[in-house]
Image (cartoon, rainbow, N blue to C red):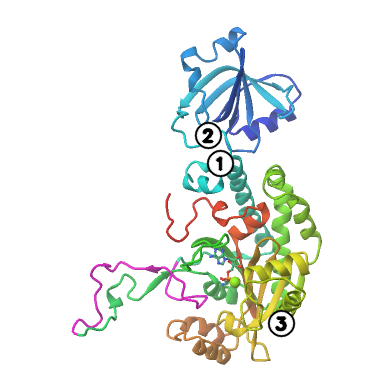
Amino acid sequence: MTQHFDTQRTMVRSLLQQSPGPSRVLAKGWIRTKRESKDLIFFEVNDGSSMANIQGVIDRSTAEGKSAIVDSDLHRLQNGASVILEGVLVASPGQKQAVELHISKVQVVGDAPADTYPMQKKRHSFEYLREIAHLRPRTNTFGAITRVRNLLAMAVHEFFQQEGYCWIHTPIITASDAEGAGEMFQVTTLPLDKIPKANPQSSEQGIDYSRDFFGKPAFLTVSGQLNAEIFATALDRVYTFGPTFRAENSNTSRHLAEFWMIEPEMAFCDIQGNMEIAEAFLKHLLRAVLSKGREDMEFFDQRIQPGIIEQLTQVVESKFHRITYTQAIQDLEDGAKKGTQFDYLPSWGADLQSEHEKFLTEIVYKGPVIVTDYPKEIKAFYMKLNDDGKTVRGMDVLVPRLGEIIGGSEREERLEVLQARMAESGLAESVYWWYLDLRRFGTVPHAGFGLGFERLIQYVTGMQNIRDVIPFPRTPKNAEF
Ligand code: 4AD
Ligand code: MG
C-alpha cells in the first residue's frame, strides 16, 4: 500500500517515528539537483515544507528502476521540473540525509528546460534573485526566510493573545498622517491628466477634493497607531498587525515603501511599562524562532550570519540596556574623541544615524539598547512632553547589526499640551478632532510601540538587505511582481 502525505516534512517525520523498515510512499516537489553515475540517477526534490530535500535514487540496473521512467523522458529530470515520485523510503547510507527514496515511478508534471530556466544549480547573488522574485522562493534561503516569517507572525499573535490583547484591524486608507512626517502615498480617483480646480476662474493651483472619492485628500496609512489609541482607551490592551506605507525616497538596506508593522497600545501604561513589554515581546519572538525554527536557523547560522544562534540566545538571556538620548550623545561624543570616525558628527538635537546606532549597540553596550527621552523636535507630535519642556518620552529599541527595530513612546494625554504640540508641528485640529476627543473624554496615560516586521526578520536571520525578507519588496522605482 502506498502512503500519502501532504508534505515531505510530515512524511519524513512520521516515517522516522515509525519502526524502521521500508515503506512505500508518494512524494512530490521540484527538482533541485541531479547527478548520474553509471546505472544510478540521484536527484533531490524539495516541496518547500522544510530545508531538507528528499533524495531520490533510480537504480537502472534493476527491473523496477528501468521501468521508473522511459528512456526518452530521462532528459526531463531537470532542475526546476515538478515531479511526483513513487517508491520505497529507506534509511540512507549517505551522510547528508536520514532517508532516501528508491524510486519505482517518476512522473514529470511540468518541465523546466535547462537552457531557459533562470535558476541554475550555481549560487546566485541576492541582487539577481530579486529580479526573479517569482522563482526565488524555490531557493534554500528564501524557503527558510518564508518559513521563519510565518513562524514569527504566529509568535506575534501568540504573545499578545496570551497577554489578553485584542487584535484590531486598522484602516489602510486614511485621511490623517499618524507620524506627521508627510511621507504618504496619496489615494485618489481624480483624473491625473485633468485635475478639477477648486476655483476654475482663477489661475490658482488648488484642487477640488470635494470631487475626489472620499471628498477630501486620502492616503495609504503610515501607521495604525492613532486608531489603535482609540481602541486602547476603550479595551485597554490592543495591537495592530498590518501593512504600512511610506513614500520616503530612501534606498537603504533597511527601508521599504511597503512594510508590515506590529503596534501594541496599552492604556494605564507609562514609558517604563512600555519598555518592559517591548523587551518581553522581542524575547518571546526570539525564543519562538530558536525553538521552533531550529533547522532554518542552523542554515542562517552556517550560511548567512555565523554565530547568530548564539548571539540571539544571549539576547534572550540578558537584560536590555536603557539609556537616555542625552547619554547616547555623550557616549558617541566620547567615541569620537577617542578616534571613532563618524560620517555624521553626533550632536545634541540631531537624529541618531545608522552608524551611531551601530556604535552604541556593537561597541559600547554590546547588545540591544533602549534609548529614551529624545529632543521633541526630532520626534512625532503625539509623544508625551517631559517636564524639561525639551524632551519627549519616546523610546527606540536598537539592536546590533541593524539599529532601530522598534520605535514607540508614552503618548501625550494632556489636551492642552497636545494641542500646543500640534500647532507647533503645523497639524490641523480639524483633521485630528477625534484624536483630541480621546483627551477630552476619559483621558488616561497610555503608551505603545511599533515593531517593523521585516526589520525583525532581518535581525533574526542575519539577512543584509530588507528586500530579501519580504516576498515582493516595494522600493523607489520598483514594484514588479
Ligand atoms: O519609528 P516608527 O516610525 O514608529 C511608528 O510608526 C509609531 N507609530 C509606532 C508606535 O508607536 N505605535 O516605526 C516603527 C518601526 C521602526 O522602528 C522600524 O522597525 C519600522 O517600523 N520601520 C520600517 N521598516 C521598514 N521600512 C521602513 N521604511 C520603515 N520605517 C519604519
Ligand atoms: Mg522611528
The residue positioned 56% from the left and 89% from the top of the image is 415
What is the CA distance from the residue labelled 3 to the residue labelled 2? 52 Å
Asked whether 111 or 161 is in front, the reply is 111
For residue 124, the mark is: 1
Could you say which is closer to the camera, residue 332 or residue 326?
A: 332
Q: Is residue 289 left or right of residue 74?
A: right
Snapshot quadrant of residue 88:
top right
The relative height of residue 327 versus residue 251 in the rendered view (above or below) is below
Q: Main secondary structure of the magenta part?
A: loop
Is residue 188 found inside the magenta-colored segment of the image? yes
Find the magenta span and give its range. Answer: 173-201
Which quadrant does ligand 2 occupy?
Answer: bottom right
Dot 1 falls on a residue whose secondary structure is loop
The amino acid type, in three-letter code, at marker 2 is Gln
Question: Given this view, does label 3 or label 1 mark the residue nearer the observer?
Answer: 1
Q: Which residue is mark 2?
A: 120
- Going from the N terminus, do you reach mark 3 or mark 2 first? 2
Residue 90, percent from left and from top = 70, 21
Q: Quadrant of the N terminus?
A: top right
Rendered view: 424 above or below 324: below
Q: Which residue is mark 3?
A: 326
